[in-house]
Image: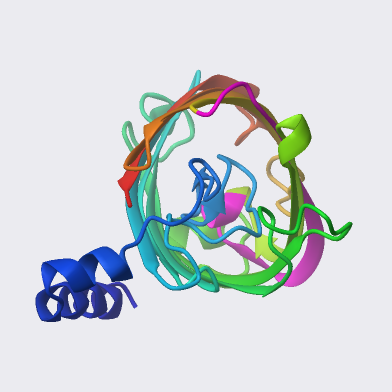
Amino acid sequence: MKNYLVSVMTAVCAAASPAAADTVFDSGKLLATGGVSQVEGAGGAGLSTWSVITGYGSRNGVGANAHYSYLDLPDFTFETVGFAAGLFDRVELSYARQYFDTGETGAVLGLGEGFEFGQDVFGAKVRLFGDAVYDQDRWYPQVSAGIQYKDAEQEAVLAAVGADDDSGVDYYLSATKLYLRHSLLLSGTVRATQANQFGLLGFDEDYSAQFEGSAVMLLSRRWAVGADYRTKPDNLAFADEEDAAAAYLVFFPNKGVSLTLAGVDLGEVANQGGQAGVYFSLQVGF
């Protein structure tokens, strides 16, 4: 999927004249309305997926972005890099590569110092109905459906800790409502998932329904504060898995860049106690 997306974007750019490129990549959406890059690559907030389509392409255009995120925890570090494209404010395609480094804790866990779990996440989202920005006179939100295919590494280790598989598919339904008059965005997502720790520790054979929620206040055109809460399944016998939460500040200097600084709490991870730390994310695009 990643190679296909790159080929499509390259072909569009190569075939278009400068004037045509300006039309295709029209940046027609309002600043900040595409959200930022969520940890699995979708448009939304850091932990929570929103129904909005990433990028600034309008219904007549295309938008795209790339991101890098880093989370420093007491016993681990987590990084993700990826890119996403929004097509005509209707369809979103995304890819994220995740790295979970155990650092010195890897030796304590018997894995070896610096042992790393990795995962590829391929996503697709489609807007079903509603428009979070322009439907201000309607009571209902923008609603989208999405899918994420996750393929984790370290199959032998995942099996040893009790995971049933090293890959799985998440399905979600998301609703987002923007109240421009009050500078407030509310979003909720129901996710059907088999994933342990977002998939980094493998997948259970059974699905469970989990919730993601966001509340964001726009302080100005360029600054926003918000909070996320995300529930997670607790499938593995060797360690408890707790819900995750985040509070963040986002700066949008222009439509090409967003910077996110957050405090994130993942709860207990791999019997190493509570894991709360500082999160930073940079997104660039159009």
Q: Nearer the viewer, residue 272 or 257?
A: 257
Looking at the picture, the colour scheme in use is rainbow
Residue 159 in magenta stretch = no
| Residue name at image x 18 percent, y 68 percent | 19
| Residue name at image x 49 percent, y 53 percent | 29
Residue 204 in magenta stretch = yes
Q: In the rendering, at what x and y percent does residue 136 appear?
A: 77, 52
With 256 as the anchor, is 92 left or right in this view? right
With 136 as the anchor, is 270 left or right in this view? left
Q: Quadrant of the N terminus?
A: bottom left
Task: Tell me the chief SS of the magenta region.
Answer: strand
- Asked if 185 appears above or below 53 in the picture, the reply is above
Q: Name which quarter of the figure residue 69 lies in.
A: top left
Please identify the residue farthest to the right as the structure is shown: 139
Q: Is residue 247 visible?
A: yes
- Asked if 233 appears above or below 108 in the picture, the reply is below
Q: Nearer the viewer, residue 19 or 286?
A: 19
Q: Which residues are magenta?
A: 198-221
Q: In the rendering, at what x and y percent does residue 247 appear?
A: 64, 24
- Asked if 136 appears above or below 57 in the picture, the reply is above
Q: Name which quarter of the figure residue 121 lies in.
A: bottom left
Q: Nearer the viewer, residue 81 or 25?
A: 25
Q: Is residue 242 visible?
A: no
Q: Nearer the viewer, residue 1 or 275?
A: 1
Q: In the rendering, at what x and y percent does residue 211 appear?
A: 79, 51
| Residue name at image x 86 percent, y 60 percent | 140
Q: Name which quarter of the figure residue 153 lies in.
A: bottom left
Q: In the rendering, at what x and y percent does residue 238 appear?
A: 68, 44
With 206 as the anchor, is 263 left or right in this view? left
| Residue name at image x 39 percent, y 57 percent | 96
- Asked if 253 appears above or below 238 in the picture, the reply is above
